[in-house]
Amino acid sequence: MTSAARQHRNDNALGDFLRAQRGAVDVGRLALPDDGRHRRVPGLRREELAERAHVSVDYVVRLEQGRTRRVSRAVLESLADALELAPDERAYLFSIADVAQPKASRAASARVLPQVQQLLDSMHDVPALVVDRRQDILAWNAPATALLTDFDALPPERRNLIRLTFLDPAYRALYGREWAGIARECVAVLRMEAGHYPEDPALAALVGELSVKDDDFRAWWGSHRVRGAKPRSKTYQHPVVGPMTLDVQQLAIEGQRGQSVITYTARPGTPSAEALRFLLQWSADGSPKSSPEPGPSRDMASRDRS
């Protein structure tokens, strides 16, 4: 196992997360008492976190050093409040603490039901994928190929949205100047899943590979930022039709453990809707019935989001 993979399976995930969140607190906003001491590092000191969470400093030290693993729900709530954790961060805190045990460890299904593939194939105007919790791409439709990449041409081990985002230059170029923000969200979503499934060897291998091959991934993974999958808009810089702003949603598939459908849709009446329509027609027959108007400008794409 690589050192990066061992980092994913770090037994002191709770301590690492608490240290990272303590360092991320904006102390200037908290109006803390000024004791005259210079802050050598940003964020809360251990004693300040202890005071805000109503626990002892020694207890915070033992938590961060991994010498205390069993934590009561009440203490976790106090720590989350003291650190002002967002809902996803709070959920992650509970998932990596012993209080949240037992953790689900059963492998996600890699088999896509025929009914689900039929659903994808019937979505002629909507790019759609089926992914598992690691964002491995299990199934796709023709519109998704037109929008993102030729998944059939990729070896199965490369069919992963996060891996493509970091290691595939053409896929990465689809995000243009938005790449860094989207890529950081990818890492945060993967970190969230790692908290729920710490013994997943395929997830550990993915983290290890990306940590070795990409400096940004390694740094962002170490920041312990977490985020659940949520609907959002993304602007794609497509080489055929130019920029398109699409709404991206991830919907769980009932009864298929760990699987979800990702859809990409344009808001009706926008330049992006017209660009997506032309792209799918062009991809389907190579000879669209009408010539496209000039690709949507960056200003038009930004108006799609308003």
Image (spheres, rainbow, N blue to C red):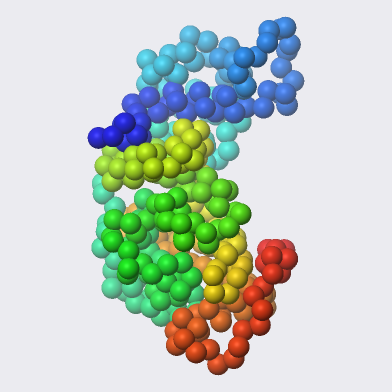
Furthest-top residue in view? 36
In the image, 258 versus 54, the foreground residue is: 258
Q: Quadrant of residue 213?
A: top left
Question: Residue at horizontal 50%, vertical 33%?
Answer: 223
In the image, is residue 229 above or below residue 48? below
Question: Residue at horizontal 28%, vertical 68%?
Answer: 113
Question: Residue at horizontal 72%, vertical 23%?
Answer: 28
Furthest-bottom residue in view? 289
Where does the image place residue 124, in percent across and percent down from the top left?
45, 81
In the image, 180 versus 18, the foreground residue is: 180
In the image, is residue 12 above or below residue 88? above
Question: Residue at horizontal 38%, vertical 19%?
Answer: 66
Where does the image place residue 68, in percent across and percent down from the top left?
38, 17
Q: How many marks?
A: 0
Where does the image place residue 114, in percent across and percent down from the top left?
28, 73
Residue 280, visible in the rendered structure? yes
Where does the image place residue 104, in percent across and percent down from the top left?
31, 42
Q: Quadrant of residue 4?
A: top left
